[in-house]
Image (spheres, rainbow, N blue to C red):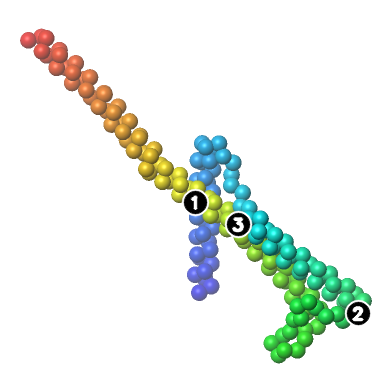
Amino acid sequence: MEARYEEIRQKQDANYELLTIWNKVWLPLFLKNEFQGKLRRYRETEYESQFSALEDEIARLEASIQSQEPIQSQNELADSSGQGIDQHERLTLLKEALREARLMMEHDITRNYFFLNTFSSEYVAVALEKYILPLLYGLLGAVFFSVENPIEGAAGSYLSTGS
């Protein structure tokens, strides 16, 4: 199962690279810069408050460990047996939670960037399919008609005047 998940992730990364290249082709045509995967203001505020709470808790715990005085945590952590976890373990868990929260924020930014590129390439593909290609086909037909028509007209008038 893990190998299948890794294969799907690699395919997604390859599609992402192709999508980025495709968008680099058409974005300059519309005088646009490359997309930035930004978070919405409320998500950014949510992450920042989560980071701040974890950093404050880590700072309190580190100060407690340095002074060798046990303190009560705002979020008392307990292991599966229901007994309290010692401060060093709790500090490790909090640092890991902070790291995971930062990774989740980066994941959200990257996912937003991916969706922006996906949607924009879909819009361009639809515009090409529905508007630009029909115009080009019509232009091509008009060119062939105008090239073919004068030749038939000239040949017909040459033959009719000569008889």
User: Disc 2 marks which residue?
Assistant: 68
Q: Are marks 1 and 2 in contact (CB under 8 Å)?
A: no
| Amino acid type of the residue that numbered disc 1 sits on in the rendered structure | Phe
Left or right: 127 with respect to 154? right
* Mark 1 secondary-structure assignment: helix
Left or right: 145 with respect to 64? left
Marks 1 and 2, the one that precedes in the sequence: 2
Q: CA distance from mark 3 to mark 2?
A: 42 Å
Exactly how many numbered labels are in the figure? 3
| Amino acid type of the residue that numbered disc 3 sits on in the rendered structure | Thr
Q: CA distance from mark 1 to mark 2?
A: 55 Å
User: Disc 3 marks which residue?
Assistant: 110
Q: Is residue 55 above or below residue 29?
A: below
Question: Which callout, 1 or 3, points to the residue nearer the camera?
Answer: 1
Q: Position of residue 143 (x, y in %)?
A: 30, 27
Residue at image point 71% right, 71% down: 97
Marks 1 and 3, the one that precedes in the sequence: 3
* Residue 70 seen in this snapshot: yes
Residue at image point 73% right, 64% down: 49
User: Disc 1 marks which residue?
Assistant: 119
* Mark 3 secondary-structure assignment: helix
Q: Are marks 3 and 2 in contact (CB under 8 Å)?
A: no
Which of the 4 quarters of the picture holds residue 59? bottom right
> In the displayed image of the protein, which residue is found farthest to the left?
163
| Amino acid type of the residue that numbered disc 2 sits on in the rendered structure | Gln
Residue at image point 52% right, 56% down: 14
Q: Position of residue 117 (x, y in %)?
A: 53, 50
Front-lying residue, 67 or 14: 67
Q: Position of residue 93 (x, y in %)?
A: 74, 75
